[in-house]
Amino acid sequence: GKLPADFSRTGAFLEQKIFNSISSETELMRYMHTLQKKDLALDTSMISLGSCTMKLNSVSSLAPCSWPEVAHMHPFAPASQTQGYRDMLESLEQYLITVTGFDACSLQPTSGASGEYAGLLVIKKYLEDQGQGHRDVCIIPRSAHGTNPASAAMCGMEIKWIEDSRGMDLAEFKALCEEHKDRLACLMVTYPSTRAFFEDNIQETCEIVHQYGGQVYMDGANMNAQLGLTSPGIIGADVCHLNLHKTFSIPHGGGGPGLGPICVKKHLAKHLPSHVVVEPSSKGADPCGTVSAAPWGQAGIAAIPWMFCTMLGKQGVLDSARYSILNANYMKSRLEPHFDIFPTNKNNKCAHEFIMDFSDIRKKTGIVEEDIAKRLQDYGFHAPTMSWPVPHSLMIEPTESEDKAELDRFCDAMISIRKEIAKIESGEWTAEENPLKNAPHTQQEVCASEWKHPYTREEAAFPVPWLLQRGKFWPTVARVDNSLGDRKLKLRLEE
């Protein structure tokens, strides 16, 4: 059982103080709690990260993951020992088939990117089966998630971009399809668009792709706005992946674990992934291969979306989409008088998220989106998604999990920050010395004897009343140099 001598350690290791200073469970508990307090999480306030769907991960849906029957099952256990597990997995597949309007599902992919890759492999296998294996052009809108072109490149496809900042222009799109009609393999499209609105012409867009011999891959990142209201099948897609760690309430962040299953129409079902050790019931007759080390991917967390769907039922899943769209449009209407909102649809309505554009504020005051994101920490809020898909912006997605009081608190914080920006515009505070440029403010700085800023300590750390009423979240560190961190692979902590 020993490692070969060539791999044995010869030097000292784990010499840092933290590994040699705790010798009791009591102190370990306190140390872990100290780490927890550094994390601005959902137990403090809403996390409005656009395109991330940071909804509640309910205790009741998480509980089964700790059951030995779920947690301790080996992926390659004999079928005679896994019947109940398989029933649960196949039941979840049926839930996802219903919600997508498709005909078959594979739970094997373990992330959204893995789902994209699997979906494109299915498309490639289908085209080869049809004698169209030479088709290798993938059209992707500019606003797409970065994993879309990465997955297409991994599948050997040539990527053709199309502008969609104001919605996809059908004439331009049709001309692009015509130009590559003999090689068009697929369109990768996100619906609703990552620009935060429903594309009015999505069905016509899908029809055009089919007319030119291609398939439509729908990125399911924004599926939370579709649940029960529409579906990938209705809009005309052929395959999609679902982020179960977003839409279906599996916790996510920090690299996993995740589930990114794919659902497909009937003509693609025969090419769904299989496995060399244990064949999942979803495998196709002519599979595209294997995309995960385990036949059902991250099966241990599949109980979470199963519980989510089972407990909510048809009406509850539908309401998830309705409330997420309602919440986003309510926040948008409150913030519109104070900030520039990136254009949505012709009815001035967004989908389940919206984008605030700070380009004009940047030009007038020098305040950038990062300053506002950092300042939100002083108000007790995690920053929304920054500078994507629109430069100099914040994208806000409240999800269905937040009540009106929490939505109003976030809006009140943003409006208060806008008033602070107005003081910079008026000259009361300089462009260099103000609460936004100095944010976030740590407890050490606020409590120090010396205070050199032109604004008060209260304005810095307690700018709104609820911070005294609900309790203050103190950022652990002040502003860091992001670009320096990007350039330096290794940083040293000096105590």
Image (tube, rainbow, N blue to C red):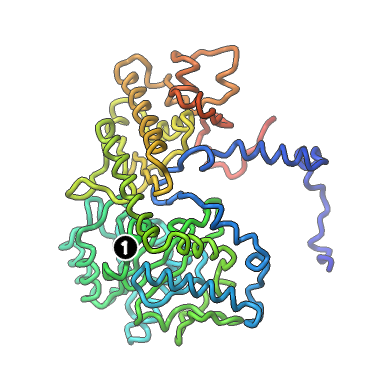
Identity of the residue furthest to the left in this view:
171
Q: Residue at x 59, y 72 (%)?
A: 293
Location of residue 227 in the rendering, given as x and y in whole percent from the top left corner: 35, 60
Residue drawn 37% across and 43% down?
396
Q: Where is residue 128 in the image (x, y as percent from the top left)?
A: 37, 84
Along the viewing direction, whichever of 398 and 209 lies nearer the viewer? 398
Q: Label 1: which residue?
A: 189
Closer to us: 200 or 388 = 200
In the rendered view of the protein, which quadrant contains the C terminus?
A: top right
Quick one: SS at disc 1?
A: strand
Q: Is residue 158 left or right of residue 438?
A: left
Q: Residue at x 49, y 26 (%)?
A: 467
Q: Residues within 10 Å of mark 1 (few under 14, many from 20)?
A: many
Q: Position of residue 390 (x, y in %)?
A: 32, 45
Expressed as whole percent of the image width and height from the top left, the position of residue 285 reads: 45, 87
Q: In this view, does 276 lie to the left or right of 235?
A: right
Seen from the viewer's position, the closer of residues 404 and 107 is 404
Rendered image quadrant of residue 355: top left
Q: Is residue 451 above or below residue 465?
A: above
**What is the number of callouts on the image?**
1
Q: At 43% from the left edge and 69% from the top edge, which residue is drawn?
A: 95
The amino acid marked with disc number 1 is Val
Q: Indicate the quadrant containing the N terminus: top left, top right, bottom left or bottom right.
A: bottom right
Left or right, residue 117 beside residue 207: right
